[in-house]
Image (cartoon, coloured by chain):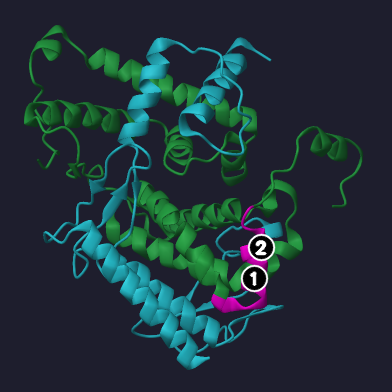
Chain colours: A green, B cyan
């Protein structure tokens, strides 16, 4: 709103995305009970983000609860002080989540004991053999993603799971849009390279065995 | 723009198309490397969105509703900041950037802070696979309750919550 010179021209070059949540945010500010709409809209997204970060259902629930309580109590300040892309409710919410997570990690020094289990049933092909192959393929991808540097993995999760744009991810992570694009590009390349290095001729012919941490 | 930036830009445009972000410009992206394209599709399948248990979702909704009724948020931030019970550290102390900072403390009422384990009472933690022709069922599956049944339960709970709202207000 009070940008000067270069900042203003930069902002003019990049259109500020319309925050589709603005009416809901304003409604929630007028009547706190209306916060429920925002909560329902984003609870799965925040929970997913928390789960990918903590790899623990209980910790993810705990973090989700903290995030929404903080957002609820801080809603008035959000609109008064933020502007431009920062004013997007979803970005703000994920920044709260990111900071809550950092705080939690600092406090508890919690480290994952095992990768997030992929023992979920995939409703898909009827053929069990095909299903096993697909599961194994996904488990390899998961393992490769697990090995990524934290920032790349986080960017990938925000891009694919939360379906955020590079710009939004940049706002959440405190990086430029271009840097986020490069992060994601490198992440995809790393995952592809890892899978390629794991592949062997026998993998092509045989049905791969589930990994040890695979509960299936 | 370096070659890497350019390639990253192309990949990003391709992902916009793949993930169909509505705010992204709807132009046909440049073709990207086949292995990266295949990887993008694979990662998209691998990274599903999770949904918390219905019990957790409703419990937190209920808590937020109670906070709202208590008139917690105000123009100056949260009121009733330091009541009984513990408190969650405020985002500002958690390193929230100043423009988004929230200087208040959030009240946690005794006995209501502990999250309900997803496996305890919620039969399903469903994972969304948006538009991918499938639905993953979460690791907390404890019974054969169908998604449709669970959705009906959630709907009934919401209806009850709305009714409670009307009674309380």
Q: Secondary structure at mark 1?
A: helix
Of A166 and B100, the residue lying toward us: A166
Query: Does the magenta segment cover residue A30?
Result: yes
Q: Provide the residue designation for mark 1.
A: A27
Q: Residue at x 63, y 68 (%)?
A: A75
| Position of residue B156 measured from the top left corner of the image (x, y, whole percent) | 32, 75
Q: Is residue B79 visible?
A: yes
Give residue A133's quadrant in the image.
top left
The chain letter for the residue carrying disc 2 is A
Give residue B74's quadrant in the image.
bottom right
Q: Is residue A127 left or right of residue B25?
A: left
Query: Does the magenta segment cover residue A136?
Result: no
Query: What span is in magenta?
Result: A20-33
Q: Secondary structure at mark 2?
A: helix
Mark 1 crowdedness (10 Å alpha carbons): few <14, some 14-19, many ≥20? some
Q: Provide the residue designation for mark 2.
A: A23
User: Eyeballing the image, is A165 above or below A59?
Assistant: above
The chain letter for the residue carrying disc 1 is A
How far is the residue under mark 2 from the one under mark 1? 6 Å
Instruction: Tell me if label 2 and label 1 are in contact, CB under 8 Å.
Output: yes
User: Eyeballing the image, is A87 above or below A158?
Assistant: below
Kindly report the secondary structure that dominates the magenta region of the rendered protein. Answer: helix
User: Eyeballing the image, is B17 above or below A205?
Assistant: below
């Amino acid at each position: 709103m009070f940008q000067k010179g270069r900042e203003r021209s930069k902002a003019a070059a990049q259109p500020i995305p319309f925050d589709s949540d603005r009416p809901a945010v304003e409604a929630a500010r007028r009547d706190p009970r209306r916060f429920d709409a925002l909560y329902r809209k984003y609870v799965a997204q925040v929970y997913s983000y928390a789960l990918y970060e903590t790899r623990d259902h209980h910790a993810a629930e705990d973090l989700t609860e903290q995030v929404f309580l903080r957002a609820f109590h801080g809603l008035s300040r959000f609109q008064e002080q933020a502007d431009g892309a920062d004013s997007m409710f979803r970005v703000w919410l994920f920044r709260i989540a990111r900071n809550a997570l950092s705080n939690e990690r600092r406090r508890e020094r919690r480290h994952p004991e095992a990768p997030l289990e992929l023992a979920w049933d995939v409703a898909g092909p009827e053929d069990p053999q095909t299903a096993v192959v697909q599961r194994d393929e996904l488990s390899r991808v998961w393992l490769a993603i697990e090995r990524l540097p934290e920032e790349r993995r986080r960017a990938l999760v925000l891009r694919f799971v939360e379906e955020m744009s590079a710009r939004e991810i940049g706002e959440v992570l405190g990086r430029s849009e271009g840097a986020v694009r490069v992060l994601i590009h490198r992440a995809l390349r790393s995952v592809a390279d890892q899978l390629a290095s794991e592949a062997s001729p026998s993998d092509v012919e045989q049905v791969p065995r589930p990994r040890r941490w695979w509960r299936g | 723009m370096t070659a890497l930036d350019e390639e990253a830009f192309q990949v990003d445009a391709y992902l916009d198309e793949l993930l169909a972000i509505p705010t992204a410009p709807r132009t046909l992206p440049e073709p990207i490397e086949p292995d990266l394209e295949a990887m993008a599709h694979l990662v998209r399948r691998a990274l599903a969105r999770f949904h918390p248990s219905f019990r957790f979702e409703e419990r937190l909704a209920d808590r937020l509703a109670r906070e709202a009724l208590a008139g917690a948020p105000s123009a100056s931030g949260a009121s009733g900041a330091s009541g009984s019970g513990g408190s969650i550290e405020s985002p500002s102390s958690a390193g929230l950037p100043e423009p988004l900072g929230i200087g208040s403390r959030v009240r946690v009422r005794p006995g209501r802070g502990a999250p309900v384990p997803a496996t305890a009472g919620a039969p399903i933690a469903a994972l969304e696979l948006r538009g991918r022709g499938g639905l993953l069922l979460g690791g907390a599956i404890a019974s054969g309750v169908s998604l449709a049944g669970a959705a009906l339960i959630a709907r009934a709970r919401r209806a009850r919550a709305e009714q409670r709202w009307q009674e309380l207000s």
